[in-house]
Amino acid sequence: MKVVIAEKPSVARDLARVMGAKEVKDGYISGNGYAFTYAFGHLVQLCTPQAYGYHNWAISNLPIIPKQFELEVKKVKRDGKQIDDAGALKQLNTIKALLGQAEEIIVATDAGREGELIFRNIYYYLNSKVPFKRLWISSQTDKAIKEGFANLKEGVEYDSLYMSARSRSESDWLIGINATQALTLAAGNRGLLSLGRVQTPTLAMICSRYLENKDFKPQAFYKIQAGFEKEGIQFKTTSNKIDKKDIAEETIARMQVGMNATVKNVEAKETKEQPPLLFDLTSLQQDANKKYGYSADQTLSIAQTLYEKKVITYPRTGSRYIGEDVFEKIEELFQHLANTAQESIAVISKNLIGAKLNKRSVDDKKVTDHHALLVTDENPGPMPMDQQNIYNMIAKRMVESFSEVCLKDITTVVIDAAGVELIAKGTVIRQYGWRLSADQVELPDEDKNNDDQDNENAQLPKLSVEEILEVLTLELAERFTKARPIHTEASLLKAMETSGKEIEDDEMRQAMKDCGLGTPATRAATIETLFQRDYIKRDKKKLIPTEKGLSVYYLVKDRSIAKVTLTGKWEQKLEEMRANKVSYDVFMKHIKDYTEKITKELLQLRIAIAHEELKPLQKGKIKCPKCKQGQIQLYDKVAQCDHYARGCDFKIWRTLNGVFLDEKEMKNLLEKGKTSVLQGIRNQEGQIVAAPLIFENFKVNVG
């Protein structure tokens, strides 16, 4: 019997259906010589510090660096204790029993770094010696699954991928565990202060941009604007920036409406605007955030659903290219879109059939484990609006990427008026090319200043050097410098992709991806972790640090754990390990040395923290109802015991049954067991009532 291990029950069911296995058992499906079983994410994890004998948080324990990392069943926390996850343990026992009868294992977890780790952790935890092969596919269509099973890869081909995944997991454990404990203890147990290898530099980027924006003082500058007309075509010109008002006023005083001006230079050039590259996950998340306001996590979740519905290819890709083999079949996909897509996409798809296609997104050397996102030839059928939006974005990007270049004639005219140089630019599109399918309004780039378009004109008349024109309008325009905008998820993802370097060119950014923060598959989870830690919050699309997030940032901003470039270099080394260019031992020695260094750095902060108090939001004291020893710290969204490091995990949301509890009512609830009568309470039936909240047996109910 061959045992197939998938990452999710839904995927296992789909693989079983395609391969003819129909007998549903507890935890697997069998038939036709196969048993299809599954994990549900990570069933096995790296052991917690308690497994190595570190039961309490203490400075004397740090740094915690196991001689050899051990694996254990996934744990859940209950009543302050780590216990085995019952569901994970049951499924592991099912897999163990199946492997006892297996002649071969087929690894069908997601074809990427994390999927490889999920399988290998199970395999090594169970001490299995059964030989295994790898199913490596980029879509879940029946055709792709059958082809994948017919062309299984040798398991050893993915050993370097596993070592990269293992190193990432162990380095995150070392840095996260030690840095978190060191900072929490240094701060005197004022609640959990979580740090992480990718999490902390990401928080630093959000906080530094926020503070830069808030502290920014706009500086005034001035431009002289003059209007002209020829052959019925009106156009505007603008001077270069003038920093001082008195100089600007002196300059415009030399000019007047009705005066003559002379054309000094006319430069016309044809420019080719190449279509955008195909989507990888990060660029899809960026555009979905700009266009629909979807979070990175939402977009990944929607894309994963579309993948499991078989209508798009593997979403967790870091490549924006396809290989020649995929390109050979691209016309079939345009035929499919011509028959099934929304009208605007269908029309362009039809025009691309038989046409010469743009091959900017075709490059075998730039395809990583998976090619760029494409639709498949499966009919999507009716879908919820959010899925339809993401599907259409991927389909639309496909027709753009393979369309012709956009040809523009850009004319720049320089006019002299009383010694003042005035500039006008005109753009005429000669061939729309890929822009036929582009949005009428460009998606805004939140990370760019687009305030300097004073001399742009849709059209300019034909002008020649030394031609005389009359000044028809004249104005002194005051402008102000603008701060770089506060990060949105779109601009943050872009910054994570390039370790904070400001790179506009798509291809240059793609070249930087190996030394970005995290991977396309993990960036959404990193951002969500910052929300869960109550370090950041949303204000519409903006990412705003909380008081707690800023407090942590101020403490670590000058420490190496907050340095974006360092984390980017580690990510690069992990990619090199995947390509067998760096060894596990060399990388992990560097990480262990760094762990010792950062732990020492953070523990030394005890002196600084004594002078720079971490500010909880309340003035009074609320006794923890669970441990009776600690005090409750109030943050924006949660209230939490400050004895976390001593084993108390008590935490409660500040918004309960639709009402936000201020300090007074939180004190009433946790110390007296009951709030006063609150307006706007939502009861169990969903009705809005005026009632107290009651705290009993660590549960909150409506009185």
Image (tube, grey):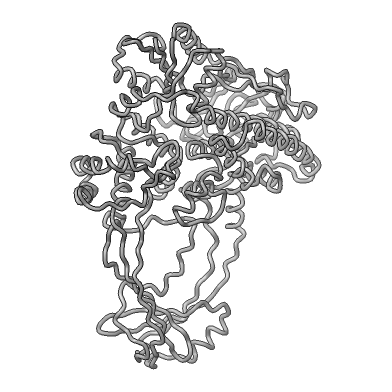
Determine if residue 633 is in view.
no
**Residue 51, can we see it?**
yes
**Residue shown at 33%/25% (left/top)?**
145
Q: Nearer the viewer, residue 117 or 152?
A: 152
What residue is at 36 percent from the left and 61 percent from the top? 273
Asked which quadrant contains residue 650, the reply is top right
User: At 36% from the left edge and 47% from the top edge, which residue is drawn?
Assistant: 362
How many marks the image carries: the answer is 0
Task: Give the camera-side residue of 142 and 194.
Answer: 142
Relative height, residue 221 to residue 686 (above, below)? below
Q: Position of residue 509 (x, y in %)?
A: 49, 51
Q: Residue at x 31, y 53 (%)?
A: 358
For the N terminus, the quadrant is top left
Q: Nearer the viewer, residue 663 or 190?
A: 190
Image x and y of residue 346, in percent:
21, 46
Q: Residue 179 appears in which quarter of the rendering? A: top right
Residue 108 location in percent, x, y?
A: 42, 23
Q: Is 41 drawn above or below residue 658 in the view shown?
A: above
Q: Quadrant of residue 168?
A: top right
Asked if residue 226 lies left or right of residue 162, the reply is left
From the top left corner, tell me how far across and down residue 608 is, in percent. Answer: 78, 44
Left or right of residue 298: residue 114: right
